[in-house]
Image: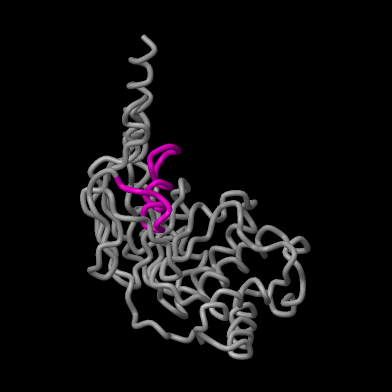
């Protein structure tokens, strides 16, 4: 089981968030007046076309990027606003698309180094917890391997365990399964849900894959094309635990169609706007 050193938190409040890149030059508006709430322990998936500002939004929550307008709060505390100094922290762990394991260190070292270095837990406690979580996601016996020996799906699972070992309030995942083939992706998604059921952290997950969004989420935030605004919020009323059998259920298909219809209308508008620009 995870050590719950921090009280269960992780409520995110995004209020009128805006982001403009290069305001003095070409003035690219990435986000415009984005507002929504994510409850503590909720699995929130942001879905939308490429370039809609999803990653920008994740980066502002992580503390890597500055907002131009609006605020983001975590458990009622101001996390970011224009001019506020950037403050990444172990309370918000990010799992990136391209991975972040140190190739010259073992898997066990990679997943335990964070909490050990921060003095949250001693080495033997961290290693025991890490072995338990790794075996939960089908990685028993690979602790002494190096990341270069692992497949893409195994690396993703190790990275998620690494992030969870820091006991964050929010787990931020930026299209983490995008590069995986369909079969591997489905396996890794099920393992992620297993970990989520074990320790319901707030998860903020970005994807452009609608089926993935519906399978994982409690709530889906559908974004428009750039400038990214909230087009629609869809609550996914499908009970947990979930497995792949739900993909053919009537309820699943109904939610999936609702999200696809919203995105389709948006994509058509974007296409027509592009056509007008070319005309």
**Residue 216: x, y in percent?**
44, 62
Q: On the image, which quarter does residue 203 sit in? A: bottom left
Q: On the image, which quarter does residue 61 sit in? A: bottom left
Judge left or right: residue 27 versus residue 199: left
147 and 150: which one is in front?
147
Asked if one can make out residue 85 in the rendered structure from this viewpoint, the answer is yes
**Residue 154: x, y in percent?**
67, 65
244 and 68: which one is in front?
68
Q: Is residue 233 above or below residue 3?
A: above
Residue at x-position 50% and y-position 65%:
245
Residue at x-position 72% and y-position 60%:
151
Q: Which residues are magenta?
A: 48-67
Q: Is residue 107 above or below residue 188?
A: below
Residue at x-position 43% and y-position 73%:
168
39 in magenta: no
179 and 51: which one is in front?
51
Residue at x-position 72% and y-position 69%:
105
Asked if one can make out residue 231 in the rendered structure from this viewpoint, the answer is no
51 in magenta: yes
**Residue 244: x, y in percent?**
52, 64
Judge left or right: residue 129 versus residue 86: right
């Amino acid at each position: 089981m995870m050590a719950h050193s921090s009280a269960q938190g992780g409520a995110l409040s995004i209020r009128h968030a805006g982001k403009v890149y290069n305001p003095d030059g070409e003035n690219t508006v990435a986000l415009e007046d984005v507002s929504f709430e994510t409850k503590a322990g909720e699995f929130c998936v942001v879905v939308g076309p490429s370039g809609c500002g999803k990653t920008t939004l994740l980066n502002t929550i992580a503390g890597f990027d500055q907002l131009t307008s609006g605020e983001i709060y975590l458990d009622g505390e101001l996390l970011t606003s224009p001019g506020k100094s950037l403050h990444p922290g172990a309370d918000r762990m990010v799992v990136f698309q391209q991975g972040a394991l140190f190739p010259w260190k073992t898997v066990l070292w990679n997943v335990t180094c964070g909490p050990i270095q921060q003095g949250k837990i001693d080495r033997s406690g961290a290693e025991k917890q890490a072995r338990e979580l790794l075996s939960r996601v089908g990685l028993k016996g690979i602790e002494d391997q190096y990341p270069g020996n692992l497949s893409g799906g195994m690396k993703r699972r190790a990275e998620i365990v690494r992030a969870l070992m820091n006991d964050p309030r929010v787990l931020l995942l930026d299209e983490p399964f995008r590069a995986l083939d369909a079969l591997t992706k489905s396996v890794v998604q099920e393992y992620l849900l297993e970990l989520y059921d074990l320790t319901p952290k707030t998860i903020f997950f970005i994807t452009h894959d609608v089926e993935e969004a519906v399978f994982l989420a409690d709530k889906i935030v559908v974004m428009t094309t750039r400038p990214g605004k909230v087009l629609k919020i869809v609550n996914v009323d499908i009970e947990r635990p979930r497995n792949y059998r739900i993909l053919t259920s009537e309820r699943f298909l109904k939610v999936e169609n609702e999200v696809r219809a919203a995105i389709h209308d948006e994509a058509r508008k974007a296409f027509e706007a592009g056509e007008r620009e070319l005309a």
